[in-house]
Amino acid sequence: MRERMATPEWQETVDRYADSYLGLARAWQLGVEKVPAVVIDGRHVIYGQPDVEQALNEADRLLSQESHP
């Protein structure tokens, strides 16, 4: 087991799990309630849109409405 844990493949797996955990923990901190969700600037969440580019366009539209009521 120690030999296996010393391989680059093992470290890649560990890194992938760590990245996944950090993403999940950040989503919990931000109050994300369901997926798909795109978080923008750690303040805004667009739900139901898996395409990040489209979610950003939607966010731009909503933010421009906020600044120009």
Image (cartoon, rainbow, N blue to C red):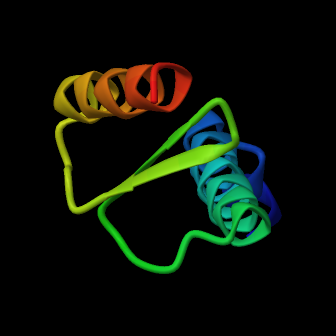
Against 38, residue 34 (above or below) is: below
**Between residues 61 and 52, which one lies in front from this camera angle?**
61
Tell how many labels.
0
Q: Residue at x 46, y 20 (%)?
A: 68
Which quadrant of the view contains residue 23?
A: bottom right
Q: Residue at x 72, y 61 (%)?
A: 30
Q: Position of residue 14 (x, y in %)?
A: 68, 53
Q: Position of residue 47 (x, y in %)?
A: 32, 61
Against 67, residue 59 (above or below) is: below
Q: Position of residue 39 (x, y in %)?
A: 52, 44
Q: In the picture provided, is 19 more to the left or to the right than 39?
A: right
Q: In the picture provided, is 33 more to the left or to the right than 62?
A: right
Q: Residue at x 30, y 25 (%)?
A: 61
**Between residues 25 and 40, which one lies in front from this camera angle?**
40
Q: Residue at x 79, y 66 (%)?
A: 29
Q: Residue furthest front?
A: 69
Figure quadrant of the C terminus: top left
Q: Position of residue 51 (x, y in %)?
A: 17, 38
Figure quadrant of the N terminus: bottom right
**Between residues 11 and 46, which one lies in front from this camera angle?**
46
Q: In the picture provided, is 16 more to the left or to the right than 2?
A: left
Against 31, residue 44 (above or below) is: above
**Between residues 35 and 24, which one lies in front from this camera angle?**
35
